Image (cartoon, rainbow, N blue to C red):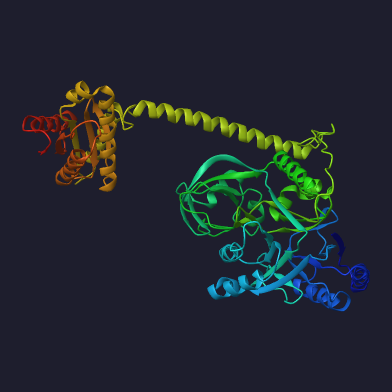
Amino acid sequence: MRQLQTTYTNNRDLASTFRRWRGIIEEKPCAAVAHVFIRFDGDQSNRFSYEIIRKLFETELPMVPFVGCSSSGQIYYGHITDEDVVITLSIFDDPTTQIHVYDYPFHRIAIGQGKQIVRYELNKIENVRGIEVLSAVTHDEFLEIAETVDSFPEEIEVFGGIAVGDEAHTPVSFTHAESPSSDNVAIVVYSGENLHIKTTRINGWRPIGFPIHVTSSSEDVLYELDHEPAFDVYNHYLHIPNDKNFFYNALEFPFQVTTPNGNTYLRHAKSSNENGAIIMSAHVPENSLLRMSYGDPNAIRSELIKGAKCMRRFQPDGIMVFNCLGRKLFWGSEADNDIKELADITDMLGYCALGEILRYRGKTVLNNLACVVIALREGNVRAVLEDPEEAGTQKKEGFDSSDGVISLASRLASFINTMTEEMMDANNRLQELLVRATVDDLTRIYNRGEIERRLKRMVSICNQTKGSVCSIIMGDIDDFKMINDTYSHQEGDLVLSCVAEIMKDVLTDEAAEGVVGRWGGEEFMILLPRTSLRRAGEIAERICDEVRNFIFEQHETVTMSFGVTEYRQGELLTEFTSRVDENLYYSKEHGKNQVRMV
């Protein structure tokens, strides 16, 4: 396999290059495919450049299909360039290797019957090794594409990129058969008995600052973070204004998203509206945890070296790279730092994308701020290459201290991260101390000190709010001493813990606002703000029934007695608690296993 490259400057030079390429192909007829990447904001429109190139392909290379899209930078002979058009021809040497190029309207992939047709067409191809996807679809539309390709066996690699555009330039993809469009999906299928494909993903973005909670969101729109307008985060911490340059300024500082189910990924902001809502590159579920992230040069460098080492052992004949435009913006004039380790291995093609597609463990996902690398090889590994580390020439990870700008940025990021981690550790230790000071060690509910503090607060609010009510429940486990004496203190501890859990479960099930705490020994106190005596009595009766019906393995039924009372405006706190204590005493003295309300 070989990769040949050229740029488009004028028709005459490109035609001459194409004729030379045709001579190479005709010497040994084999499969070939070309990639055409056109800068989204180049001097000529995408459609104008496409039509010129398409006509030259028809004239000089009619046997070669091509595929491409709009980009924000193309890889040309190992460098990320701002040339308007870069064309790469991949020529395969093994006669069994085949390339199939398709261009589907999005609705054909999205609709159920259309999906089946696409799957049927692709399933007819034998020895499929990889599927490349280029498109300008939205994230929601991408999910439909992913569902289609994920029906293929897990060992088939899926990769690709999303085309780049902005408000003035529509993102597009295209093939030799279809003109540039934002609605189509270009697919290249790589197959062959002796074709091998290996993929990897390089990141390097590290979280920075404190976690932020997504308190209001809908699909790809963030409305509130920690109950404040989402845009305030960028404005407060980074002084990024809400203007036409918001996308470019915010792109270098994406969010690390940890969803409620534990998945973690990067997502960047696309725009912000006048109300402070942020439109993200993809869905960010409500109740997710966000942290601002920052490209750490040393982390990127370290991951790049590891990725390149893995690819070098694979011994590829050619490499494809789909790199995020955010990484290009991060590096600025030193964008080649992101690919130079890979460029040392073999020929390379690729572009800077809005989103990077890669399949992992059978699921195709859209990445942000990633560098997706695809290595292709025809035939088996030829010989074991000498590992530079084993040969005593270990490549240094990180950047030399003489690289002033990079070193300063890296050290600032390291400083902020270290400070943040230390503050978070201190905060976690403080939270642990607070828990230990407010929570009962055995039952894991509030201890008496915390319940008394909350009780005072509840009564104070009730006195200050006209028409407000609140109630309390005091419960006591019947004959608890006998349980300890008969079955051991360990069994008694188990009973206390089970009763505490039952109380919490009932409060949750009843949608009550209350909290429960251990008042002392086998006594419990439940605080119920904005709750009447009648409603508090219902909750107490429910707890009484649940405890009585709970099955303990070592002994007979456990029962509880309860006292319930409602606060009377203006009375002393001691009068309030004394009355509930008297009601509990009444229950104990009149048969136990009951609720007394006064």
* Side of 490 where 49 appears, left or right: right
Give the quadrant of residue 92. Answer: bottom right
Q: Is residue 594 visible?
A: yes
Task: Please name whichever residue, 126 or 500, is drawn nearer the observer in this view of the structure.
Answer: 126
Task: Please name whichever residue, 388 or 245, is drawn nearer the observer in this view of the structure.
Answer: 388
Residue 13: image location, x then y, percent:
93, 70
Locate the N terminus by quadrant: bottom right
Give the quadrant of residue 579. Answer: top left
Residue farthest to the top? 485
Question: Does 126 appear above or below 557?
Answer: below
Locate the C terminus by quadrant: top left
* Side of 589 where 146 appears, left or right: right
Residue 335: image location, x then y, percent:
78, 49
Question: Does 510 appear above or below 571?
Answer: below
Give the quadrant of residue 586. Answer: top left
Task: Please name whichever residue, 491 or 510, is drawn nearer the observer in this view of the structure.
Answer: 491
Count how many numbered circles sit on residues in the image.
0
* Side of 250 where 516 appears, left or right: left
Residue farthest to the left? 590
Residue 19: image location, x then y, percent:
92, 72
Q: Is residue 355 visible?
A: no
Residue visible at 58% across and 75% down in the picture: 114
Residue visible at 12% across and 36% down in the picture: 593
